[in-house]
Every structure is written in C-alpha cells, then in structure tokens.
Amino acid sequence: MSRHIPETIQAIEPLRPDAPFRDVDFAPIDLQLTTRPDGSLTLSNRLALATLPVQQIGEYLHRYAAERPNQTFLAEPGPDGQWQHLTYAQASAKANAVSQWLLDQQLPAERPILILSENSINQAILQFAAMQIGVPVMPVSPAYSLMSEACGKIADLSQRFLPSLIYASDSQRFAKALAVARAHSPNARWLCDDTVNADAVTFDQAVATTPTHAVEEAFGRVGHDTIARLLLTSGSTGSPKAVIMTQRNIIASGVLWDQVWPFLAKEPLVMVDWLPWNHTAGAHGALAMVLRHGGTLYLDDGKPVPHLIGRTVQHLRDIKPNVMTNVPRGLDMLVAAMEDDPTIAKDIFARLNAIVYGGASLAPNTLLKLEQLSAQATGQRITVSSSLGSTETTMPATLIWWPPKVLGTLGLPAPGVEAKLVPLGDRYEIRFRGPSITRGYYNDDNANQKSYDDEGFMLTGDAVVFADDDHPEEGLFYAGRLSENFKLATGTWVSVATVRGNLLPQLHPYVTDAVLTGHDRDELGALLFLNTSQIRKRLAGATNLDDAALTQFEPLQNIIHEGIERHNRNFPGSSTRVMRALLLDSPPSIDDNEITDKGYINQSGVLKKRADAVKRLYNVQTSGEDCLIINT
C-alpha cells in the first residue's frame, strides 16, 4: 500500500490544536484492512452491524406515540412565524388515518406516490402513512415543478413510473406540474392541502378517515425487504434513476449511526434542518434519524441563499440543536454570519455535539473557521464530520466518528459497510456493499447490470486516497469523480474535483462555480459562473451593468486574473495550472442539465451546452472581451 497523497490534495492541519474537543461519546476506531492478491484492498469496521431492532420504521412512530405521546416530533413555522407542533401521538393517529384512506383507494404497490412539494408536516404524515402499509413514496425536487418551464422531468417520471397518487401542498403553485403528471399517468389521483376541484381530495379529508383493522394487517405485512422510498439520482447524465430504499436500508443506516455515535442515545435528539426529503441526507439524515431516537425535528424554512439564510440563523439561535447536518454552501454562509456577529456562534455552538456535511467538498478556510469560532465561543472544538455517500448508500458509507487529527477527510467505513478500493494510478476507485446499500434501481435492469461488480460491490464512480498511508485509521480523502476527469493532450490526467476545489477559494466571492476544460488540449482552462449579486454589491461601477457587461468589466477581470495566478503559484503542474478562463454571462440551466436540483454543477452538461464557448476560449491568443489568458 505504498501510496502518497497526490499534490492537488491538501491535508488541513488544525488551527486550534490547543482547544480540546467537546467531550462527546464516540465509538473507538477499529479498522479491518485486507490487501488482496489482485492489488485491491478491502476496508471494513470490525464493529459488526447490530441486529436490526424493528421490521419497519413505522414501529418507531408507534413506540414513541405510546412512550412519549405529548413530546413534539415535528414543528414547522406557521403563517404567523410561530412554530406549529405535531406530537408523536398526533403523528401516529394522523398517519394511521391516512393509511386507511390510501388503502381505500386500492393503490397498487408497484405504482408509487409522487410527492412534488417542499418539506412539511403533512408531507411527513403522508410518507409515514404510505410506507407503513407498503406503498412506496417518490418525493421529487420542487425545482422540477417550479424552476422548469416545461416540467420535463415531471413528465418523464410520470410516464416511466406511473404514479398512482400525486401530492402537492399548494395546488396553485404546482398547477402546471400536477397537470403534466396527470397527463402522463392515467387514473392518478390528486391529493393537495387546499381544494383544487371535484376530482381531487384535500389532505384534511384524508386525515378524517377512521382507521380499521385493515391498517394493522397491512402494517404487519411490511418487512425488511419492502420498498419504502424511491429516491431519484440527480439525472445529470440523462433521466433520473429511481434508487430503491427498502425498510432494511433505512433501518440499517440508522443503526450504524447509533453504533459509532453512542451519544445519540444519551439525550433527546434535537435538529433544525432544511435539507429536502427528496434527497437521502434530508430523508434519512434528518427525518428518519430524529424518528429513530424519538427526538424533535424543526423544519427550517430558511436555506443557504442570501435572502433566506437569516431565517436559518434565527432558528438555530432559538432552538440550539445538538446535531447539525448541512451542505458546504450552508456552512460557508453560517460561518460568514458568525464572523459578522460573534454572539451567533455562542448560540449555535451552545449544545452542538457534531456537525455533519456532505454532497461536496468543504473549503479548507471554512473548516478552519468552524474550528476557530467554536473554540472562541465555547472553549472547545466541535467535531465536524464529513462523509462519502450517495443516494445509493442510503446514508454515508464512510464518516468521521472521532475527533480528527487532520481536517477534511471522509472518515472510514461505518459498521456493516464494506469498502473495496481498486488501484487507479495514484488513487483508488472506491466501491461499497452492505445492508445499507441499495439493491438497485427501480424498473431499470440496464442500470442495475452496470452498477455492481461481480462480487456485489456497488460502483460509486468516486476516487479516494488515504490521508496517511502508514496510518489508514486517519481516514480517506476524496480524490475526484472518475467520470469528470480527463486527459490533456500530453496524456496527463486532470482531477476535476481537486483542481476545482483548490481554484474556487481563490475566486471567492465573485465566482460561484467553475467547469474545467482541456480535454485533448495542451492547456487547462475554466468556464466561470459569476456571482453577479456579490459583484454588483462589492465593485464600484458594477451596479448598473447587465450580466453580459459584467463579463467584460475590467476591475472584475483583474481580480479573477489575480486569483487564478495565486492558484497557479500554489499548483504549478500542467494538470493543475489554469491557463485560460472565460467569464459566462448566464447561470447554469436546470432544463439543459447544467445544474442538478441539488445545486451542483454538471461538468459534462455544461461542456455540452456551451461547446461554442469552449472553442472560442481556445481560439483566442490574448485576453479580450470575456476571455482571460494567464501567462504564469
């Protein structure tokens, strides 16, 4: 295993090693590493996955309805901004009522319930009501309905999966999507919170149904192998695939967290979370996790966008959660808020035991600032846990469950997860198998045949390296997405994720994202998406310029040029040095597959859509108009 960290991947040393970590009960690290004759490695946790305690997650809801009937399970902001609470007893009763209504509709189990709208108490009730009687739910991104002109993905999903019931909270906001879904799924019913027409049912009508023994009978037929959810992949390379989430997957993913984070059982879990339930982090890292522990989940109506981050900050200050999950962009914005007002940090870190993030790399500066801010506010460092996972792994397949010596790793395999590392140059391709890993994609034999190797390991398409070859227990670093990487004309490979991750901090806050170019060319280049609001706010003379004019605004070009030069001084190799850049005058399009509903850039989608821009970038010899040539 004689490997070293590639030069583009930087280990981040703690800024405040003098400050102790908050005293939290974590499991010890006990890693099993095996080198195989073919050169591949297997990594697993010697702590075996514990016996699954229930047959389905509905048992948790019934248990806590009996044990703690008056405790708040879910809370959401009402029209007046005040929290509206749902107790465990109320949640169980309403779920049983809606289960009966669903049974009365005689919905076939092979046709899922399509959920169009954002997180809400009613959506949670519908999901639990359906899953506890064996009817799968398919929550989809609201962006498919609200940010798309044609609702093309809604049409595609409805045609392929023929939902039996379509739910939207607001029939007016989702009117176009509801009509498109109905047109492509014959005989589908509508369920909305408000009145639509005589052909639809309101949520209040469904909740008013009186449960019968039929609910108990259907409940008893649900087991570990019953499909609970169908969660969609991003669809960045075509139509989204529906990932099968069985009861076993969801229950196992909760058990593995408990084993490495024993502190979860020692105090009531309280979370404030905005992550959408159409993604696994929100569905399983927040909603299912809180249910498993009989905790309380506050549905955050804020988001990591400028006009809504204030809501998130206020909710975190008011509630003071003990576990936080977020995405890197959200943590970036929280750090900025805490720097502006140090009292925010005192409130947010008051009871916090751990922060979990995933979905993308977190900027080193943000990691260090989280460490610094928590130490200043509490005298202690808070463990920041990164992870590697996907929709297909239900929850993170690897994670950090210890106070790390080096920041920014992906951790190690969780109990029950076995990782296979296949050598690939100076890094490894990583694959997974285990009870929390999906058994495949719904109604998609072609994708299933391509997604697993002959040993049953799921192909992730991700690359990793060890943080320390001599001490593998220190964890893994992310080393890029295999499908995004490409070769220059010299035959040198470019690791897109690592170069992009090193470049963007040098261009902050004027650039939101970068797409690397240079396949079969002599030089590495970049297409840059601009943060137009920050540019107009920060740069004199930019206020009244339109987006096209901003791309040729000399003060901005100078700043970006200097940022790229700084990056190149740090990473001067041919596969890391960005020699030309083009400033784009339009944001990425969800309809053109340039950006996923998660907000992540689709490298191949942008390059396909903007092929003419790439050609123009490589045809120019000197800086001019919207193109920059870097001569260092």
Image (spheres, rainbow, N blue to C red):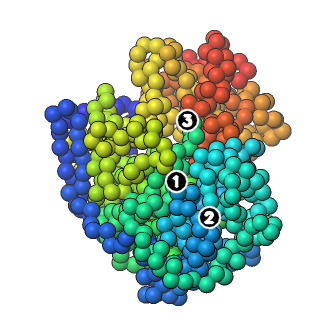
Q: Is mark 3 on a helix, strand or loop?
A: loop
Q: Do the residues labelled 2 and 1 touch (CB within 8 Å)?
A: no
Q: Mark 2 and mark 3: span between their CA atoms?
A: 26 Å
| The disc label shown at residue 563, or none | none
Q: What element carries label 2?
A: loop
Q: Do the residues labelled 2 and 3 touch (CB within 8 Å)?
A: no
Q: Where is residue 101 in the image (x, y as percent from the top left)?
A: 62, 75
Total residue callouts: 3
| Outermost residue, left side | 37
Q: In this view, does 466 lie above or below 376?
A: above
Q: Characterize the local packing of mark 1: few (<14), some (14-19) or many (20 or more) Cα atoms within 10 angstroms.
A: many
Q: What element carries label 1?
A: strand
Which residue is at the front of the view, 151 or 11?
151
Q: Is 398 positioned to the left or the right of 47 in the image?
A: right
What residue did someone put label 3 on?
Answer: 237
What residue did someone put label 2 on?
Answer: 119
Amino acid at pointer 3: Thr
What residue did someone put label 1 on?
Answer: 231
Which residue is at the front of the view, 565 or 198?
198
Q: Residue, x 69% and y 30% (percent of image)?
A: 584
Mark 2 and mark 1 lie on one chain; the one further toward the N terminus is 2
Q: Quadrant of residue 451?
A: top left
Amino acid at pointer 1: Leu
